Image: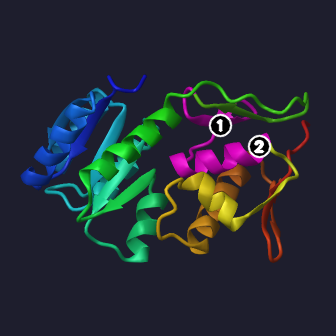
Amino acid sequence: MDTKAHIFIVEDDLKIAALLKDYLLAAGYQVSHEANGRLALEQLRLSPPDLILLDLMLPELDGISICNEVRKFSQVPIIMLTARVEEVDRLLGLETGADDYVCKPFSPREVVARVKVHLRRSMAGLIKQPATEQSRFAIDKQQLRILVDAQPLNLTPVEYRLLAEFISHPERVFSRQQLLDFAHEDQRDINDRTVDTHIKNIRKKIQGKLPGNECLHSVYGVGYRFELPLSI
């Protein structure tokens, strides 16, 4: 059950914050709110919630900066709230560690639906990995992390979901559309650039742990394929 989960709203528009809080409380969640970016980050360091609804433009510290800092100590799901709909802003939010975004004006019911989806993902159990004694990757969905040679990769939630799917199906070729579906279930206005950006970031992070191992391969005209590296 995710109905007792704690949702932290970071939003300086008090009317929007109050509306979201009312809907989330009605859905059975615990809800807290902070309007100031700097104070919000202080609270998050002390007690991370189960999910964060994070406005992009905030006093003292903006949403992107908060996202960056939170990802240094927590993989809590983060849904960005923004009135800036340009593609670069969407990509920036996702690359910085945001799990999802909602563009203003939005339906509070839609936000609650997104919250439910991300809480189900984050509170799910351990993913069963393909049976292979040689795999150097371990997937831990309880902690929302992937380990390489017992060392955790510093992944965003979207990167985590994509890489977990690759690892669970080695050698399978995934189309960009399939990868978009894994990353974002609601089929919003996102495109191939988003997938390519995530793949580029995942490759870089794997290279940091396994220099010389090219695990993610482009399949021309189709998408991407993952090969598990062998143990040394």
Please give the range of residues in magenta. Answer: 142-168
Quadrant assignment, res 177: bottom right
Q: Is residue 15 left or right of residue 224?
A: left
Give the distance between the C-alpha atoms of the residues marked 2 and 1, in whole angstroms: 10 Å
Q: Kindly identify the residue that appears in the image at 57 percent across and 54 percent down.
A: 183
Question: Residue at coordinates 53% horizontally, 55% vertically from top-left?
Answer: 184
Q: Which residue is mark 1?
A: 146
Instruction: Please say if 154 is above or below 32.
Output: below
Above or below, 106 relative to 140: below
| Viewport quadrant of the N terminus | top left
Please state which amino acid type lies under the numbered disc 2. Ile
Magenta residue check for 156? yes
How many residues crowd mark 1 within 10 Å: few (<14), some (14–19), many (20+)?
many
Residue highlighted by disc 2? 167
**Residue 87 appears in the picture as rendered:** yes
Q: Quadrant of residue 137?
A: top right
Residue 123 in the magenta stretch? The answer is no
- Label 2: state its secondary structure: helix
Label 2 Cα crowd, 10 Å radius (few <14 / some 14-19 / many 20+): many
Which is closer to the viewer, label 2 or label 1?
2
Closer to us: 22 or 195? 22
Report the amino acid beneath label 1.
Answer: Ile
Q: Position of residue 4 (x, y in %)?
A: 32, 22
